[in-house]
Amino acid sequence: MALSRFVRRGGVDLLGGAVGRPMLWFAGASLLAMVALGFAATAIVRRQARAEAIRDAKQITRLAGEGIAQPALTERMLAGDQAAQARFGRVIHERVLKDPVVRVKVWTLDGRVAYSDERPLVGRRFELEPEVMKAVRNRLVDADVSDLDRPENRYERRFGKLLEVYLPIAAPDGQRLLFEDYVRFGAITASEERVFARFAPALGAALLLLWLVQLPLAWSLTGRLRQRQQEREALLQRAIDSSALERRRIAQHLHDGVVQDLAGVSYSLAAAEMPEAAGSTRRALRELRALMIGIYPPSLQRSGLEAAVSDLLAPLSARGITVQSAIPSDLALAPETEELIFRGAQEALRNVAKHADPTHVMVSVHRSNGSVVLAVRDDGRGFDPAAAGGAERSSLGLRLLEDLVEERHGKLEVHSSAGRGTLLTMELGTR
């Protein structure tokens, strides 16, 4: 029953909180996921908005180049005639050079500036970039951030970051030329912001709605998980209670049946003057009583830990081994802690009796820094854990005990060396 109380404390009571916490973790994690998704979506929308703004700039440049500049071209302007240049310039200033367009150039394909609203550039030659020539060959409108370090762009440096947009146009004689204008990049950014502002509220609302829709589903799943945990705990509780009742029934059956019969046989053999047979029967009786204590320790429930450990030490004392027990009589422990301490001492002493061949065994229980510590020490043959066969000395019962201790967030350690005995310590929190 003490073990069942231990399971209840480590089970439903704690699981109720442990099941509730994942709901908060899920809500927080999903919110972070939504925020991350929002940042990613924002980056995508902004990139698309910028691409849309650049497409608009290309379209405007196509209209300016093909619809305004190309019809105004004359052979005299291309030949450098100043009057023709002035007439073409007035058309460009009146109809093209309006904010955000800050510069216009017309190039021949050999790199000569046939026209620029910045007069010192007219007639000069510069090397055209490969991307520009590719756009001309493919008759495409293209755009790129202007490299203000290039010599042909030195007059644009005062405008700051610019987007240069270029496309091929045709001269009156069919010669292919390049029309290029420079747009303030701030206008591209502003257009990007306007496009993003149209989508941002819908995007934010969609993400918020997605997060809110998940919460009821998570709450429902959490409730189901809590119910399943309680059902499993109920099944475990019934199994533990059944196990305790069965151990008690077996111990009672042995005590009322086989033990009484063996006691009667030992008296009969003693009366029949058969001392050897009587002694063997009494030894078997002692071993059977020790087994009964292991199955169901009545003294632990009735008289406490000190008396129960004394019962465990009795078979060793009967074999001539010096035993000592240091357990305070006023040591008050929770029933589940007391039972686990008893199981630890029982398993350690079982291994001592089976493997150690000691002359002295000491069992102590004491409090230390808010914990209770069990120590079982013997001066037997010990073993080397690193040597061949050392691992086999760790019995199945000890490994199962270690699992129980870990469930209680305790610590179980075994220290041993060949010829120097063994020390088992178990530390359990009592807070």
Image (cartoon, rainbow, N blue to C red):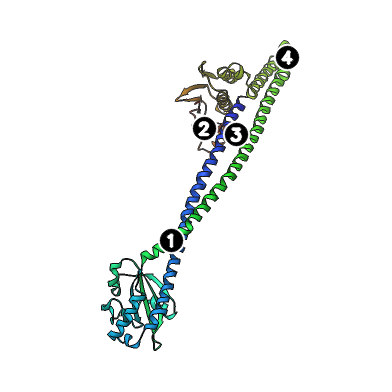
Mark yes or no: residue 389 visible: no
Amino acid at the residue labelled 2: His
- Of the two numbered discs 3 and 1 on the same chain, state the one appearing first in sequence: 1
Q: Position of residue 357 (x, y in %)?
A: 55, 25
Query: Disc 3 designates what residue?
Result: 396
Residue topped by disc 4: 264
Q: Please report whichever mark, 4 or 2, sits nearer to the chain's N-terminal start.
A: 4
Q: Of the numbered discs in the image, which one, if any, rests on residue 409?
A: 2
For disc 1, the marked residue is 194
Compared across the picture, whether 21 is left or right of 69 comes to right
Q: Nearer the viewer, mark 3 or mark 1?
A: 1
Q: Which amino acid, by three-letter code, is at mark 4?
A: Gly
298 over 405 or under it: above or below: above
Name the spot of residue 7 as percent of width and height, x first. Answer: 60, 30
Q: Secondary structure at mark 4?
A: helix
Q: Marks 1 and 2, how far apart in space?
A: 59 Å
Q: Which circle marks residue 229 in the picture?
A: none
Query: Mark 4 vs mark 1: which is more N-terminal?
Result: 1
Which image quadrant for residue 250? top right
